[in-house]
Amino acid sequence: MGLNKPYSNATRTKVALSALLAMLVVGTQTVSAATTALESNDWVGISFWIATAMMLAFTAFFLIERQNVPDKWKTSMTVAALVTGVAWYHYTYMREVWAMGDGSPLVYRYIDWLITVPLQVIEFYLILAAIGVGTFVMFRNLMGASLVMLVAGFFGESGAWDLFGDSNAEVWWAIGMLGWAYILYELWKGDVESAAASGSDSVQFAFNSMRLIVTFGWAIYPLGYLMGAGLIDGMGSDDMNILYNIADLVNKGAFGMMIWYAAKNDA
């Protein structure tokens, strides 16, 4: 009988903190940028350091608070912690690339997005699945659109696949925008929006809040793309990195906080 006894909240919190400590050990052993002097006027570097610290703080909060929400929200809280945790890990490397004077950490950034953005899109499916209205078709379509958006963005910014000559950056940007537009359609007018309408007040709050983040918060990324590609006069790589760092911090952190708030207020 003792084997079936559920773990207490205190025990589960200790497990979460142990996992967080393991993350810290791995991060501090593999990254040396923390010892690099940061210039007081290095606004890009400052934004990298702030984003790194806040991603870790969000991860710790989500892991601990996961024990204090109803069971149907626990998976969503886990994914929220994964989003900020993966981002924290990648930011420790991105800030090192910048601090060492190696330029914009574009590859690391897209590796991070290829993991965290689909996870954020999956959150919509998870909160709907928790009330029994999520479907595999929703999952497949949202995942596919997010990958189209990200892969097109990488090809456009990196120039890794130059298919369109002088208009390469603009065409890939347009393709990525189509992926984002499809996600927005599903969230505002499609099957995903219709399914969310049948949920509780907490589910609808989480859905509407995350939908607003994807609509307005994610709008920052196409702007950063245009800056990095030199398509906005007077703005370049530095402006792009600051904007991307702020966008990541707000969108990933706020995304998880909306899930936590809805879960805590769900009866």
Image (tube, rainbow, N blue to C red):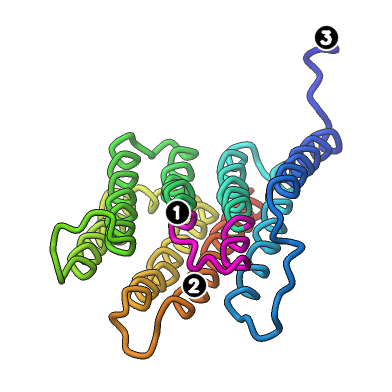
**Does 1 sit left or right of 243 as displayed?**
right
For disc 2, the marked residue is 241
Where is 7 relative to 73, above or below?
above
Alpha-carbon distance for marks 3 and 1? 45 Å
For disc 3, the marked residue is 1
Magenta segment range?
Answer: 92-109
Image spot of residue 157 (x, y percent):
32, 64
Q: Residues within 10 Å of mark 3 (few under 14, many from 20)?
A: few
**In percent of the image, x 54 and y 60: which residue is there?**
252
* In the foreground, 252 or 265: 252
Residue type at the position of mark 2: Asn
Image spot of residue 264 (x, y percent):
67, 53
Q: Is residue 259 visible?
A: yes
Local secondary structure at mark 2: helix
Alpha-carbon distance for marks 1 and 2? 14 Å
Residue 150, image quadrant: bottom left
